[in-house]
Image (cartoon, coloured by chain):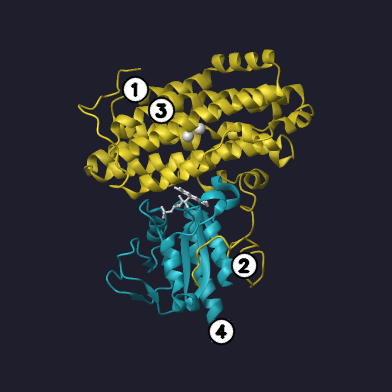
Amino acid sequence: MTEGVKLHGHVEAINWNRIQDEKDVEVWNRLVNNFWIPEKIPLSNDVQSWNTLTQEEQTLTMRVFTGLTLLDTLQGTVGAVSLIPDSITQHEEAVYTNIAFMESVHAKSYSSIFSTLCSSKEIDEAFRWSLENENLQKKAQIVESYYHGDDPLKKKVASTLLESFLFYSGFYLPMYWSSRAKLTNTADLIRLIIRDEAVHGYYIGYKYQKGLEKLSEERRAELKEYTFELMYELYENEVQYTHDLYDGVGLSEDVKKFLHYNANKALMNLGYEAMFPSSVTDVNPSILSALSPNADENHDFFSGSGSSYVIGKAVNTEDEDWDF
Amino acid sequence: MPDAATTTSSRLIYFSSASGNTARFVEKLGAEAARIPLYARDPELTAQEPFVLLLPTYGGEEGKHSIPPQVLRFLKQEQNRKNLRGVIGAGNTNFGTAYCLAARKISAKCDVPLLYRFELMGTPDDVHNVSQGLEEFWKHLSRSRP
Ligand SMILES: Cc1cc2nc3c(=O)[nH]c(=O)nc-3n(C[C@H](O)[C@H](O)[C@H](O)COP(=O)(O)O)c2cc1C
Ligand SMILES: [Fe+2]
Ligand SMILES: [Fe+2]
């Protein structure tokens, strides 16, 4: 993997007291505060719940998790690392090393889930499926080909689409189980991953937009076109992958809405407008509230509450430095 | 744009960090709006008219300190709190229970309604809803509080 990694002529010691981009420090701090390991989550409490799933549901769940393992492995060992040589600041390099490490934690946490819930024979079978599934392999290959390319901004686009879009065909399922009060500890763990991916996608997308600022109008237009082309290519593949996984349990259409919704967010992380209209992004409310427990509260100006408005529901306001 | 000016009569006051998602949303709204300054060395902003506050959440550990310090500094001015009529939150549902937490906290602390929430730079639907919602909101307020 040494090809593509440029070595600097000399190595300079990182000085965190001279900051060129305050986002580096902000994101670094947030990532450090977010640090977690799967051992902190009582996954074994899900064993009983796991046994209530049908054989087909168990197989589906394992396949989904091997798929997610593959993506986190790719992002941890190749993706985030490939961004390091293109860093503009040393602090940016440090953030990528943090991201790469957390991807390895994510990849390992799926193994914790497996070893808690399944037999090793079942685990091996699920990994074999992921090795043989064309659409899963294709999505990894598409992204990886850009990681080995030499365009720093295209790498960031591929990376942001992976962080903010490609995981969600998989993330759907633990949110679905959680909404039915199943595998709730597993869902807690996945929610930690989902939160991490939001910061990763935000940061890489932000650095992409910083990079765009210095380019000609023409180059910017070219990169935008490239982004949407890559999005379409990945999207078509995701749809196939979704059918492979979810047709058996009849959830494919529901999953696709979740894909559209997240595709829009991935594009926004890159500074582009949403691509899917609201008619196809109406994610099942139970999935949305599994993701964010108060996201379905109604705060739509007047609607739902006549002419009165809704004050934010009970939240702890004591942990802010109000000063008034 | 009230650059050097320290006072504003804008009906919409917002904060947006260097990533500029919220600023982009405001641009799409096309409404006159004032931005809370990013740096402590910038002059403070004071609202002279009733306004709605739009802000993103930057959550810390377990949701602590999720209101950007620039916004806390802005709210420290009594006149700004007096003129505050409502809050709109920007955020990302990936943050789970902390989704738009900063806006929720301000709504609860200052006893003003949380009018709307959206993610990142907002979809065309969000732009439409906020644009219409704000218009109705001000109409409604002028009727009920002459
Ligand atoms: C480090 C970090 C922490 C964040 N924390 C939260 C959060 O707790 N809740 C939330 O809803 N959004 C959170 N967000 C998402 C931001 O609120 C969102 O990206 C917003 O669009 C940023 O607005 P701006 O670009 O105008 O600053 C966070 C983003 C980052 C980078
Ligand atoms: Fe990850
Ligand atoms: Fe990630």
Q: Secondary structure at mark 3?
A: helix
Cα distance between the residues tagged 2 and 3: 43 Å
Pointers 3 and 1 in contact (C-beta within 8 Å) = no
Which hue belongs to chain A? yellow
Q: Is residue A134 left or right of residue A157?
A: right
Cα distance between the residues tagged 1 and 2: 50 Å
Q: Secondary structure at mark 2?
A: loop
What residue type is disc 2 on? Ile
Disc 2 chain ID = A
Residue under label 4: B145
Disc 3 chain ID = A
* Disc number placed over residue A79 in the picture, else none: 3
Disc 4 chain ID = B
On the question of residue A224 being in view, the answer is: no
In depth, the one of A279 and A59 nearer the eye is: A59
What residue type is disc 4 on? Arg
* Disc number placed over residue A148 in the picture, else none: 1
Q: Secondary structure at mark 1?
A: loop
Pointers 2 and 4 in contact (C-beta within 8 Å) = no
Q: Earlier in the sequence, mark 2 or mark 3?
A: 3
Cα distance between the residues tagged 4 and 3: 57 Å
In depth, the one of B87 and A76 nearer the eye is: A76
Q: Secondary structure at mark 4?
A: loop
What residue type is disc 1 on? His
Front tag of 1 and 4:
1
